[in-house]
Every structure is written in structure tokens, then in C-alpha cells.
Amino acid sequence: MSLVSRYTKLTPYLYFIAITAYWFTIVNQTEGLTAYPILLFGIPFLWQIIKPNKSLNLTLGISFVCFSSYLILAFLSDSLHLISLSYPIKQLMVYGGLFVFASFIMALWIIKNSLSKSL
């Protein structure tokens, strides 16, 4: 059972690493060499898997909760037609809805893991 709980703590980090790799793959197909800085976004999550750090863990969790909250508000305002957005942004928000909510849940999971380690 401890093996399962160890790997469930790694799930949010693996999720964000997978999202970074997917984002890199998509941008690399169109932009080429300029896509490589995207891989830098995965370094903090990879570092948390290799050598966990409490302060980095809490910082990653809080920053991604803020970022995901902003995206959720943008998604809801588009759904409720509160502001006018262009068609490409509306298309992105339709496809990105699941990503936004999954990122929010993973960020909350990171904060939960950070707080449970400190208690």
C-alpha cells in the first residue's frame, strides 16, 4: 500500500511534465528550434520527483492554483458570454476546458501533499 501512496504523490508532477512535453511537441512541429525553451517549464516538476523540496513544492502549488483560477474565470466568462473574445480564443477555451480544470485539481493536489508533509 505504501508503494501506491508513493506513486500517487508523484501524479501531479508527472501530469505537468506530460503537459510540458505535449506542448513542446506541438510547438516544435510548427516553430522548430524556438520550441526548446518550453522544456524549461518541466524542470521544477522533474526536480520535485528527483529531490523533493518543501518550499518549491508549496510555491509550485500556489502559483499553479493562481494560474488555473485565472484560466477558470476566463473559461467561465466565455461560457457565460460576459466578454467578447475572438474565434481562435473561443476555440482554444473549448478544447482547453478539461486541461484547465485538471490543472487546478493537480495544483490543489500539490498543495495538499505539501501541507501533509509539513504537519
Image (spheres, helix red, strand yellow):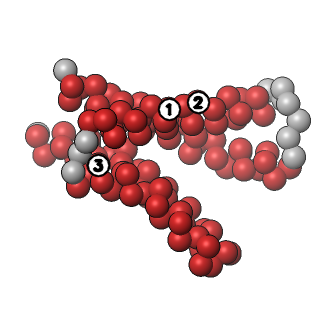
Residue 115 vs residue 3: left or right? right
Residue at disc 1, secondary structure: helix
Q: Cα distance, mark 2 to mark 1?
A: 6 Å
Residue under label 2: 69
Sooner in the amino-acid sequence: mark 1 or mark 3: 3
Write the residue at 35% across / 33% down: 58
**Measured along the vertical axis of the image, is residue 12 above or below residue 74?**
below
Residue 92 vs residue 28: left or right? right
Q: Please tell me how crowded label 2 is: few (under 14), some (14-19), or many (20+) other residues with Cα within 10 Å.
A: some
Q: Disc 3 or disc 2, which is closer to the eye? A: 3
Q: Cα distance, mark 1 to mark 3?
A: 17 Å
Write the residue at 78% across / 34% down: 78
**Picture coordinates of residue 17 (x, y %)?**
41, 56
Residue at disc 2, secondary structure: helix
Residue under label 3: 48
Residue under label 1: 65
Q: Amino acid at mark 1?
A: Val
**Picture coordinates of residue 99 (x, y %)?**
56, 45
**Picture coordinates of residue 18 (x, y %)?**
44, 58
**Measured along the vertical axis of the image, is residue 65 above or below residue 89?**
above
Q: Cα distance, mark 3 to mark 2?
A: 23 Å
65 and 59: which is toward the camera: 59
Residue 107 vs residue 68: left or right? left
Q: Amino acid at mark 2?
A: Ser
